[in-house]
Amino acid sequence: MTLHTPVRILHLITDLDRGGAQRQMVSLVSRSSGNKYEHIVCYLRPPSGFEEELKSNGFTVVGLNVSGSTKWVTAAARLARLVKSYRPDIIQTWLLDANISARLNQLLGPRIPLVTALQNADYDPDSIQAANWPRKKVSFLRWVDHFTARLTNPLFVACSDFVMRSARDHLGIPESSLEVIYNSVDPETLRCRPGESQQLRESLAIPPDGIVFLNVGRLDPQKGQEYLLRAFQKAAVAAPNAFLAIAGDGPLREYLTALAKELGITEKVRFLGTRADIGSFLEMSDVFVFPSLFEGLGLALVEAMFKKLPCIVSRIDVLLEVISDQESGLVVAPGSVDELADAMVRLHADPELRKALGVKAEQIAAARFHQQITTPQWENVYARIMREHAKSLV
């Protein structure tokens, strides 16, 4: 590699769905490209929602189309051909299947510096319990994860202190192989046209005096939307002009839609599905509600903070890294319908508190979770890896 040749980074990710890890990867790739870094994106299987966006911005995107019981081995073999063709300087992996596949490839091919972007605390006992994951399956995955990591020795970059501690304590990763770079947001991606949020309210039949509570996230037990619907039913009694909007899709969509009907709140709830224009929905809303039972960080929460929305979040370790109770948001017990309803009623009734919490939240987001801060941190990691790799070849 000559002085002026960009460092070529091959990103391997499980899919290109519009989840938090995928959005984080796309943002990092987009912001750190140029004379110093060249990015190639490879995904294992559909969905591939970000593929066209990446290609339209000039990035090489490759789908491996792997599935089934031999997916890791198949992906490793197909990845080997890509590595031979593109000759990356660094391989960076995102999400478990991609992590394992890249490590198996390393065992069979040339040792290329490997970075694992840790997005979740997959083996945290509270997370396992909240998600009701099969314990035997989790134990097997943890063993594979631990064993392949020991054999290949990646650098692990966690998206939060909580995820870093979890990897250390439950996956056995030494602290020397761990560091933290917070997931981040480019607030420019949240901008919307003048009047767009008002038009959006009108299209959703929300009156001018309506107070909108917004949740953004996959419709999954992890995200706590069942508790949110039950809490909203209670809050709506004291706040008749309140509305609830939920942006996202997932396996619980039918259940949650039926639950809203059962609770008698269908007319006040808007299920928005998967949306690319989240900035518009944040701008039209008055309060952001994030009742997750576990998270890696919570990118949707950070986006809401950049829009100066007052936030209600669950009292779980990782969200306490982001929100300070009564200062930059309100914190409630995870799964507590009553506490969540009380917080919603409180913010509905107090516009000055909404404003104060939102202003403080935006200050914290700008100071800690702006991509202008985290992109140079990633670039420093890449530069350090290349220096250390060059020394190892001497």
Image (cartoon, grey):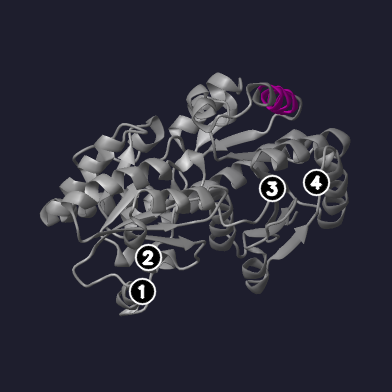
Q: Which residues are magenta?
A: 139-150
The reply to whether discs 2 and 1 touch (Cβ–Cβ < 8 Å) is yes
Three-letter amino acid code of the residue under disc 1: Leu
Q: Nearer the viewer, mark 2 or mark 3?
A: 2
Circle 4: is it few (<14), some (14-19), or many (20+) Cα within 10 Å?
Answer: few
Q: Which tag, 1 or 4, sits closer to the chain's start?
A: 4
Q: CA distance from mark 1 to mark 3?
A: 33 Å
Report which residue position mark 4 lands on.
67
Q: Which residue is mark 1?
A: 200
Identify the mark nearer the N-term, 2 or 1. Answer: 1
If you read the primary sequence from the N terminus, does the residue marked by circle 2 or circle 3 appear first?
A: 3
Task: Give yes or no for contact between labels 2 and 3 (Cβ–Cβ under 8 Å).
Answer: no
Observer able to see residue 324: no
Q: Is residue 318 magenta?
A: no
- CA gap between label 2 and label 1 equals 8 Å
Q: Which mark is first along the chain, 3 or 1?
A: 3
Residue named by callout 3: 14
What residue is shown with label 2? Answer: 281
Instruction: Return the disc, 4 or 2, that comes first in the chain's sequence.
Output: 4
Is residue 53 visible in the rendered structure shown here? Answer: yes
| Residue 8 pos. (x, y %) | 71, 55
